[in-house]
Image (tube, helix red, strand yellow):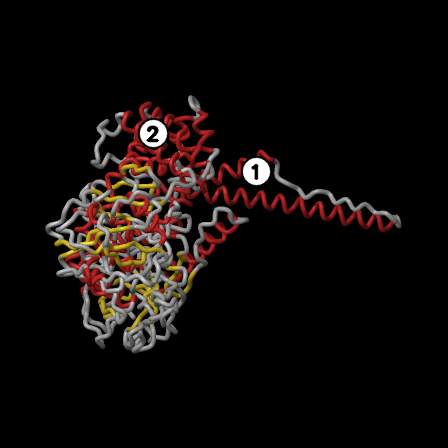
């Protein structure tokens, strides 16, 4: 870094006429030796009249600015950048930059095509110390990246075999293009999704021939962890790279002195998505096991942990963008920041400031203008306020409370540390506002138009004025269904759990008991309103409730569970668990017999006054290898696509519940407890679980913590109708709009009538 005696660059030297309409561009000055210092020219121009330029996408890395560039101070109109350095008395000033940007610019300076090419780089072209300018410039990001001639995604220097990886990617793309399966036309237009073609046509010779070519290319590099190292570079986990990558038709990944077009990387990524299907879909194994078993052997030699994590936040989003799909901010937040289940290995998205998780997606959001969310980096605005404003704007714009599905617990501190690294005083996030950074899970209801619990009110949010003007309180109308009386243990998708079969049998035994208690409640009240049209439907709750009444078996079968699809796979699971239980019992009996024989032998030794009794204990009874292999293979089948266990994944961490008055059965968040209430909220198609809190709780700016004392009045409501949201729920018997008529009633004081809810 330059000495402190030299003048430091001031952005006043290159002012923006208007930060909302102008940007700065950077030009790299060529030098004889690449070890020389970095000299650059910086100038401003209106966004509507820019020269041909390139935009750079990169990962900041550590925010410490340990390096610097020299900004050349002369009038661009009088001399070119290249000529300017020949002047004997050229004046420069120093601008500190990060180490990662220093490496990037030095590498770019060696590229002949980038010399004298204007570049847009956020760290230099935006005054990072001016929050007002930064807020304005971020609103121009969509124009900046979409209008650039191309985007260079800088991954870093060559390392960990990155040259081999890029070469392999090009080979695989060549094979795909030559196969004719994707139109046989090379262009930067988006191809038909290769994964869908692989999946739908795996039985065809063309697809099998292509996989025989490309799998041997990538598996060795996967086994050597070179491809995994490539995808673990910081660029792939940065929030801002998503829109920077997606907004331009020509994006190049640059690694060292090699570059590869994004289209090639996108094609190979779809191949990686197919590899797990060799384990989860019998059709893939059947396609190769007879004629080409070597492909299966090669694939099976690869541990699943070495397959790159899904990059849906990048490649899936760009695919949607290129196809012209309109994606809302809520959908982007959902795709980027939520996980399907505990086994979801998607990349953790990182940001220097939490609020960038919202601002970094605005350029891709089709509803950004309607939401009117303006980037705000002022120190007087907290992150909790930004997230609350975002959630409220989405609810108003969509006319739906769909976003409440992601208001999950536990709640974490969302405030950033200050410039000195000190943690700011945390402001409590309201219970109804999603936290997009701390393991938020995907909604269990991920198939559109399956449920309609509120009937015609499912898409009609009813926002009501709150008792105070506090933004952290959300007023909604809805219906109390019933109060939760009992809950079961949360479901855990733990494949390797010892004695998992016992866990499963115990889980369903508790559900069976809840069904018995539900029937007793309905019988004693003489009220059979839960399943009025089909009393036999009650027994099906045993296998419907744990699935949330959804069943998926590949892309072609997705919807409400049917007895034809689910009962056979459910019986397979229960029968196998019972078989494993019987094996356990047999093993336990053998152990007890062995222990008894050992005790008898010990007694015999003592009776003979044997001074040297044998210390050799007989080995514990063990299952033979054939039985062990059978059990292992059977568990693999029982968790494959289309199985009952596989369909329970979206209910991971949810727990069955029984309501007290009407005997409803359903699934609630794992931290639901007796005393919580199941409700319908106008503006969504599924129920929710709320927790009553003391009147007036949450009147302050912070809101509630989702763990109120639960004290309300007799009917499960409290006097002020203040609640914290516990989370989304499934309630058997109301998911098709059976209670729609009650939502039309206006008598707020009677059970079963529409009422007001104030969420804090």
Direction from residue 575 to residue 539 in the image, left or right: left
Q: Is residue 87 above or below residue 13?
A: above
SS assignment at label 2: helix
Q: Residue 377 in the image: x percent, y percent?
A: 25, 65
Kindly tell me whether residue 292 is visible in this rendering.
yes
Q: Residue at x 34, y 73 (%)?
A: 693
Q: Residue furthest left?
A: 49
Q: CA distance from mark 2 to mark 1?
A: 42 Å
Q: Quadrant of residue 201?
A: top left
Could you classify mark 1 by the number of other residues whose Cα lies within 10 Å: few (under 14), some (14-19), or many (20 or more)? few
The residue at 55%/35% (across/down) is: 629
Residue 628: which numbered mark, if any?
A: 1
Q: Is residue 544 visible?
A: no
Q: Which mark is residue 666?
A: none
- Classify residue 646 as left or right of residue 94: right
Position of 309 compared to 626: left or right? Answer: left
Of 154 and 199, which appears nearest the observer?
Answer: 154
Comparing 275 with 4, the one in front is 4
Quick one: which residue is furthest to the top in this view? 291
Which residue corresponds to the image point at 42% horizontal and 33% vertical from the top-left? Answer: 219
Q: Earlier in the sequence, mark 2 or mark 1?
A: 2
Q: 10 Å neighbourhood of mark 2: few (<14), some, or many (≥20)?
A: some
Where, by quadrant of the figure, is residue 660 drawn? bottom left
The one nearer the camera, 298 or 13, is 13
Question: Looking at the image, do the residues carrying marks 2 and 1 touch, with CB atoms under 8 Å apart?
Answer: no
Judging by the rendered image, the residue that carries numbered circle 2 is: 171
Q: Where residue 24 sits in the image (x, y, percent)?
A: 19, 54
Image quarter in which the N terminus is found: bottom left
Q: Quadrant of residue 478?
A: bottom left
Instruction: Tell me residue 407's x, y (percent).
Output: 32, 61
User: Which type of secondary structure does the marked residue at label 1 adopt?
Assistant: helix
């Amino acid at each position: 870094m330059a000495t402190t005696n030299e003048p430091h660059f001031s952005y006043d030297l290159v002012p923006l006429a208007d930060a909302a309409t102008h940007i700065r561009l950077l030009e790299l000055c060529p030098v004889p030796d690449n070890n020389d210092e970095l000299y650059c020219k910086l100038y401003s121009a209106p966004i509507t009249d820019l020269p041909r330029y390139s935009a750079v996408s990169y990962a900041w890395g550590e925010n410490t600015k340990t390096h610097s560039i020299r900004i050349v101070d002369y009038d661009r109109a009088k001399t070119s950048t290249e000529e300017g350095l020949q002047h004997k008395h050229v004046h420069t000033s120093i601008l500190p930059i990060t180490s990662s940007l220093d490496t990037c610019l030095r590498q770019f300076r060696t590229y002949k095509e980038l010399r004298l090419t204007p570049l847009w780089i956020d760290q230099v072209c935006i005054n990072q110390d001016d929050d007002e300018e930064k807020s304005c410039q971020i609103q121009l990001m969509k124009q900046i990246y979409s209008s650039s001639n191309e985007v260079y995604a800088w991954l870093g220097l060559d390392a960990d075999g990155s040259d081999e990886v890029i070469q392999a990617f090009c080979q695989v793309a060549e094979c795909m293009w030559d196969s004719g399966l994707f139109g046989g036309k090379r262009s930067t237009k988006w191809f038909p999704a290769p994964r869908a073609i692989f999946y739908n046509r795996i039985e065809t010779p063309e697809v099998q021939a292509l996989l025989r070519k490309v799998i041997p290319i990538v598996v060795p590099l996967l086994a050597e962890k070179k491809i995994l190292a490539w995808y673990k570079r910081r660029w792939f986990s940065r929030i801002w790279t998503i829109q920077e990558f997606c907004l331009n038709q020509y994006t190049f990944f640059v690694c060292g002195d090699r570059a590869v077009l994004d289209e090639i990387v996108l094609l190979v990524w779809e191949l990686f998505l197919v590899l797990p299907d060799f384990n989860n879909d019998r059709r893939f194994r059947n396609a190769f096991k007879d004629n080409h078993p070597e492909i299966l052997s090669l694939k099976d030699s690869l541990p699943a942990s070495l397959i790159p994590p899904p990059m849906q936040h990048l490649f899936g989003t760009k695919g949607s963008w290129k196809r012209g799909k309109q994606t809302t901010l809520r959908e982007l937040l959902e795709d980027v920041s939520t996980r399907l289940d505990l086994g979801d290995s998607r990349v953790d998205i990182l940001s220097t400031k939490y609020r960038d998780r919202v601002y970094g997606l605005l350029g891709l959001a089709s509803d950004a203008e309607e939401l009117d969310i303006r980037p705000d980096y002022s120190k007087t605005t907290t992150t909790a306020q930004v997230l609350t404003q975002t959630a409220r704007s989405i609810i108003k714009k969509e006319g739906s409370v769909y976003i409440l599905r992601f208001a999950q617990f536990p709640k974490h501190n969302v405030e950033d540390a200050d410039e000195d690294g000190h943690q700011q005083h945390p402001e409590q996030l309201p219970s109804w506002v999603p936290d997009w950074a701390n393991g938020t899970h995907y909604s269990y209801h991920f198939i559109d138009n399956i449920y309609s619990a509120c009937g015609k009110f499912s898409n009609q949010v009813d926002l009501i004025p709150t008792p105070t003007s506090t933004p952290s309180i959300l007023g909604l109308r809805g219906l109390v269904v019933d109060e939760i009386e009992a809950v079961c243990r949360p479901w855990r998708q733990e494949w390797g759990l010892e004695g998992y079969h016992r866990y499963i049998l115990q889980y369903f035994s508790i559900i069976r008991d809840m069904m018995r208690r539900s029937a007793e409640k309905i019988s004693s009240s003489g009220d059979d309103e839960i399943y009025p049209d089909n009393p036999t439907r009650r027994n099906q709750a045993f296998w419907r409730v744990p699935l949330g009444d959804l069943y998926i078996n590949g892309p072609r079968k997705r919807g409400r569970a049917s007895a034809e699809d689910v009962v056979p796979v459910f019986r397979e699971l229960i029968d196998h668990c019972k078989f494993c239980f019987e094996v356990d019992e047999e093993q336990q009996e053998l152990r007890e017999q062995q222990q008894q024989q050992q005790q008898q032998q010990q007694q015999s030794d003592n009776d003979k006054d044997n001074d040297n009794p044998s210390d050799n204990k007989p080995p514990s009874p063990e299952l033979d290898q054939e039985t062990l292999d059978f059990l292992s293979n059977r568990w693999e089948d029982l968790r494959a696509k289309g199985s009952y266990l596989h369909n329970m994944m979206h209910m991971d961490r949810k727990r069955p519940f029984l309501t007290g008055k009407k005997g409803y059965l359903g699934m609630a968040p794992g931290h639901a407890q007796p005393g919580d209430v199941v409700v319908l909220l106008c503006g969504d198609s599924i129920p929710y679980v709320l927790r009553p809190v003391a009147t007036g709780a949450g009147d302050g700016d912070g809101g509630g913590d989702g763990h109120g004392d639960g004290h309300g009045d007799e009917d499960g409501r409290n006097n002020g109708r203040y609640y914290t949201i516990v989370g989304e729920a499934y309630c058997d018997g109301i998911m098709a709009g059976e209670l729609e008529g009650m939502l039309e009633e206006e008598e707020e004081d009677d059970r079963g009538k529409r009422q007001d809810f104030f969420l804090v």
